[in-house]
Structure formats: C-alpha cells, structure tokens
Image: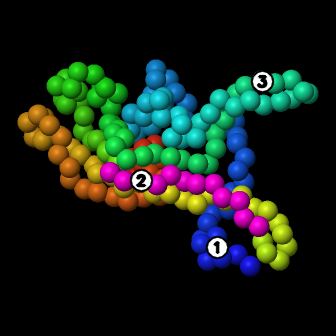
Amino acid sequence: MKNKQQETLSTRRAERTTKLIASFVGGFAEGWYMALKESFKMELDIKYTERKKNKISYYEWTQGPYFCFSEGQLFFDTKEAYVYWQSALSNVNLACQIIAAKPDSFIKTSDDVTGKIEYQVLEGYVQFLLYKPTEERTCLTPFIGYKLSQNKFVNFLKTGEL
C-alpha cells in the first residue's frame, strides 16, 4: 500500500521529450512574459541528450519534467534590463526575485501489492517577491510576494499570470 506522501504526488513518467517548453532566440525565451535568459535551460530541465537510433548515437535537445529554480535568481520583464543598470531602470516594469525554493524531485515507488514500479515527480515550490520601479525610476521596490509550485512558477514566467 502506498504511503500518504506518495498518494499526493502527480504521476508522470520520467521520460524526456523533444517538445521543448521554450525556444530561445537572441539568448532569451521567445514569447515569454519575463525575459528568461538561455542560461536557465537547466532550471527548465532542457538538456542536450544523447539518443540512439539503429545503434548510432546522436544528440538533441530534450525536455524533462523537473524544474529547479532556486533562491536568489532574478528575472525582469524586459531584455533591456540586462544592460547598464541606470538605463535598464527606465525599461523595467516588473522584476521577480526568488527568496526561497525547493526543486521538483524524482522518486521511484512501487506498489506493495502489485510490485508495479512508478516514476513520479514530487513538486517543489518557489517563493518570490515582485518588484516595481519607484515613480522616479531610481530603484525597484518590493510590492507583493507569492509562493507557487515550480510548475506554476514556470507558467508565471511564461504568461505573467499568477
């Protein structure tokens, strides 16, 4: 019989797909609400994975289900924020800084009765503050905080919706 913690997990195969959650153009995720740099591929579980077909190895980009954003990471709503800071402040309308986080984790469970093996994701979380510029646009000031699952946080970065 599964224990209580295992019953609350979302069931997903630990398989990787070639359908990526983001495509990167000019170093940023194309079409995302927050200007997410390409350097965050690891946090999105996007990896260059070895595959084999007819005993021949090749590599391709793959997507997994394990998001792992972490404390201290900072995101802006515009690419222009990643330049000289005084210039950036005139372009930023929203910033997001992670203050605490726990990554999604992979677990393997087996049903005590059937012995069937299942792969599951134990969802992590992201706690973050949103910042907006002051009226004079001389600095950013925090105005609200949220705590979301890693998956819902990725959705926020993509759509801007909470």
Q: Which mark is residue 160?
A: none
Q: List the residue tagged with mark 1.
A: 7
Question: Which residue is denoted by mark 2 in the rendering?
Answer: 101
Q: Note whether 76 is above or below 56 in the view shown.
A: below
Where does residue 35 sit, x and y in percent of width and height? 39, 33
Q: Quadrant of the N terminus?
A: bottom right
Q: Which secondary structure dominates the residues rendered in magenta?
A: strand
Amino acid type indicated by mark 1: Glu
Q: Residue at x 25, y 34 (%)?
A: 92
Label number found at residue 58: 3
The span shown in magenta is 99-110
Q: CA distance from mark 2 to mark 1?
A: 22 Å
Per the image, label 3 sits on a secondary structure element best described as strand
Mark 2: which amino acid? Answer: Ala
- Is 4 drawn above or below residue 158 in the view shown? below
Other residues around mark 2 within 10 Å, as few (<14) / some (14–19) / many (≥20):
many
Sequence-first disc among 2 and 3: 3
Could you say which quadrant of the image residue 108 lies in?
A: bottom right
Residue 49 in the image, given as x and y percentages of width and height? 69, 31
